[in-house]
Amino acid sequence: QMGRVRVKNSVSTAGTAPQRFTFPEPFSVTPVLVLMPTTAGGQPATVRVRDVTPTGFGAWLTEPLGEDGPHAQQEVAYLAVVPGVHTLPGGKKLEARMISTTKQVWGGGSKCKPKGAASSWERVSFSAGFSQAPAFIAGIQTEANERRRVPRKPSEPFLYVAAKDVKTSSASVSLGRAEAGKTDLVTVPETIGWIAFQPGTFNIAQATCRAVLSGKLVTGWGKPVNVPFGVDLKTNKPLVVASIASYFGSDGGWLRLQSSSKTGSRFVIDEDRTCDKERDHTKEQVGLLACNKPIAL
């Protein structure tokens, strides 16, 4: 399934319970779920999920330490896929899986992470038999380590999925801490969900979709970069879900969507302001799926 939800403005309605959203059609099992944070609200922020079930999920906007916590409303796209290998109409493959981990990766220097902390990665293997590196999209499915009353307060630990080395047969993932990770280590496993699409165009449930693994294009906050779809989706408001698929920037960071058109989407990579105030970032790859209308199967 693919659709949009409106995650409420938590500046004026900051509580401590996530909003609950219902899938248009229930799944037979709990799906892998990825949401696309936007650039609405100028502070560093991402969207987190919890309590994902076959019928729906909870979501809220979180900010890292150094911010006040509450964040402006965002209309975000979501992508939900049953775990496994699937053949799409036309023969293209997709694969969706989950992995539980406490492995983490820190950005910045020693002042931005706990003493003795060492970054590490999980390698995930693909079973779909891709002939080229897939469009790789990932998101955290759980919120097992949160210590604060988000979104009323900033998130601790502030987490997102870091990914790198996307190849035809595998990729690497970890819990991204960026430069906001000087506080305690993650000790309770979090579940990372990932979805890999064979690049190209496919049609499903009357929607036309395009999966892309970009080159090194997208940079930091305030410098949006267009990632072309390679086709005209014939709508100025396509549904787009994407995440960073590389780790060239040493500070860490996560993807936010600024805008979309018929032929591409403009993204920035955001960084926290916990350890330093700059939000610049080197060029990274992006994995994305763009569809011209919602999908409910």
Image: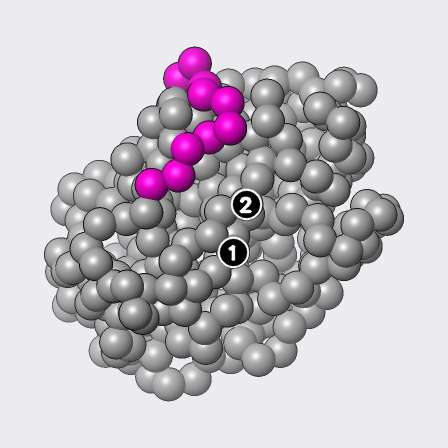
The three-letter code of the residue at mark 2 reads Arg
Residue labelled with disc 2: 4
Q: Residue 146 got which mark?
A: none
Q: Are marks 1 and 2 in contact (CB under 8 Å)?
A: yes
Q: Secondary structure at mark 2?
A: strand
The residue shown at (22%, 39%) is 189
Q: How is the image coloured?
A: one colour
Q: Residues within 10 Å of mark 1 (few under 14, many from 20)?
A: some
Viewer-proximal residue, 40 or 272? 40
Residue 234 seen anywhere in this rendered image of the structure = yes
Q: Position of residue 7 (x, y in %)?
A: 42, 54
Report the Cα–Cα distance between label 1 and label 2.
Answer: 7 Å
Q: Earlier in the sequence, mark 1 or mark 2?
A: 2
**Relative vertical location of residue 71 with respect to residue 67 in this rendering, above or below:** above
Where are the magenta residues, as a range? 20-29
**Relative vertical location of residue 223 with respect to residue 32 in this rendering, above or below:** below
Residue labelled with disc 1: 75
Q: Position of residue 126 (x, y in %)?
A: 54, 26
Question: Is 2 displayed left or right of 263 in the figure?
Answer: left
**Relative vertical location of residue 15 with respect to residue 153 in this rendering, above or below:** above
The residue shown at (16%, 59%) is 149
Q: Position of residue 213 (x, y in %)?
A: 68, 47
Q: Is residue 169 magenta?
A: no
